[in-house]
Amino acid sequence: MSVKIISSAEAAGLIDSHQTGCSQGMGGNDVAEELLLELEKRFLETGEPRHLSWIHSSGQGDKGGKGLNHLAHEGLLDWIAGGHFNPAPRVQDLITHDKIQAYNLPQGVISHMFRDIAAKRPTITRIGLETFVDPRLEGGKLNGATTEDFTEIIEIGGMEYLHYKHLKLPDFAFLRGTYADERGNISMEKEACYLESLQAAQAVKNCGGRVFVQVRAVVPYGSLDVRKVHIPGTLVDYVVPVSSAENHMMTFDEQFNPGYCGDCRMLIRTAAGKRPLDAKKIICRRAAMELIPDAVINLGIGIPEGVGAVAEEEGLRDRLTLSIESGPVGGIPVSGIGFGASLNPECILDQSTQFDTYDGGGLDLAYLGLAEADREGNVNVSKFGPRIAGAGGFINITQATQNVIFCGTMTADGLKAAAAGGKLRIKQEGRVKKLVNQVQQITFSGRFSGKAGQHVLYITERAVFKLCHEGMTLIEIAPGVDLERDILGQMDFAPRISKDVKEMDPRIFRPERMGLRWQDMKR
């Protein structure tokens, strides 16, 4: 083996124009920040390399200038295919203004694509059917500059599948590990998640490309615990010891947290009971009533994260296992820019393996955000006007999980709601209606879900809807609200109203604990 130890500047100098790169990371987790930083620096100083293409599964960045934001320069980046773009607003800006060609595909599909490229087999799955990645809709294309089809419909055994073509094969990978030995073996014991770093290295090497791995330090050969080696040296071309600890933070807001990687278990002090009884907590309280004992659950970022806090407050947490698409199983998912890590996880899987579980229906329950929904039960979380957030793992999770709960306020931008005495009062209505005639982009397909027989609820602070054959059906109303003014008047369509519509449980709207018990739950 001929592994070379070089600087990040030397690594950036080895990238040629017109190549296709790939990188790993989620938010600020496991991002090869110094390699991306030096690539940007070289381009700004020399104008090289030019016209790169890029493949990534999870969004990488801090919503500022880090991560994939380093690539966001006209002339440097020409083409990108990714699962999520929200942490990279500078890349979003290039996409919005048709400066680059861009595709958004399900995060799990791209994760599996790395594995499939390595094995030289096609990427075929039902994930994405009847959503915006379906070629009969948008085909995952994000702007007018993007014309080539990435997906096609095929039929196997009388069932429809999506074939995701491998339009670009990676020439190089920017990856990250904890330590490397002198033969290039890479350990990842100080990382919060592994994503598909191994699979990306396999894909690049089997395509004849070069693998660069940023590490904390290089250690003598034979000194690494073989059980902690995640990428063998046979898959590594260049080891890049980081020059600054600031470019190798565990997440973009924490230098290191031993509770994320299993170095130790951290004492958890929850403030769930002190959270004010606002619209978000009301939603999470109602959502918690759908919990299933001993369930494996995925909680989406945003309002759904609060379901875990309510479960803790109600004493239900011990019989739940939370998981994140990035790989952690168990523990408490980290919010904000650290999303992708979990505090005190029981296990950390490769992301592609985690999505094997998800795609096969291994989740018992999923709570996801409700950014926008329409009369057919379609949900959009990926595109809002010119802003392209991307689907992330949303499509994989919502299409393959039997019980799906969407959580969000009925209106946005200015909503003020107050709960007292078991009732809800809308003090000020939001300026933006979220229940619309037609969503801007279909990230979740109500029609596909109906055919799959999923149990789907849409929980807001004032009403609960269920997905039925006729579309969204109103099944519960908060005590104290007016049906016409506060619910129907804040929707762009008239939902079907259940014949036995009920009041939401008044305990939800009182400040004290609800007193939930497993034996009283609906399932």
Image (cartoon, helix red, strand yellow):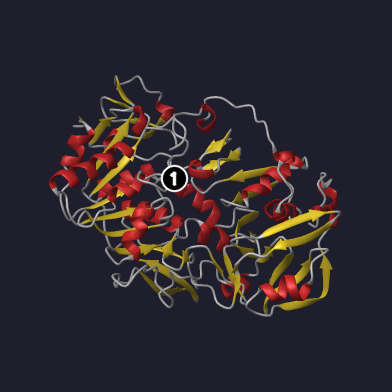
Quarter assignment of residue 37: top left
In screen coordinates, is 59 left or right of 289?
left
Q: Nearer the viewer, residue 212 or 165?
A: 212
* 49 on left or right of 498: left
Looking at the image, residue 432 lies above or below residue 180: below
Asked whether 135 or 472 is in front, the reply is 472
Where does residue 508 sit, x and y in percent of width and height?
80, 53
Mark 1 residue crowding within 10 angstroms, few (<14) / some (14–19) / many (20+): many
> Does any portion of residue 340 appear in the rendered image?
no
Q: Residue furthest front?
A: 428
Number of marks: 1
In the figure, residue 505 lies in which quadrant?
bottom right
**Which element type, helix, strand or loop, lies under badge 1?**
loop
Above or below 463: residue 296: above
| Residue 480 visible here | yes
Would residue 471 be found to the left or right of residue 175 on screen? right
The spot of residue 77 in percent (x, y) is: 24, 56
Identify which residue is drawn at 29% across, 71% down.
148
Quarter holding the C terminus?
A: bottom right
Which residue corresponds to the image point at 26% horizontal and 32% vertical from the top-left? 240
Of the pair 365 and 342, the residue shown nearer to us: 342
Residue placed at 28% from the left, 45% from the top?
A: 173
Q: Is residue 198 above or below residue 447?
A: above
Query: Where does residue 475 sit, x and y in percent of width and height?
Result: 77, 70
Please, what is the three-letter code of the amino acid marked with disc 1? Gly
Q: Which residue position is annotated with label 1?
A: 27
Q: Quadrant of the N terminus?
A: top left
List the single residue furthest toward the left.
46
154 left or right of 418 in image = left
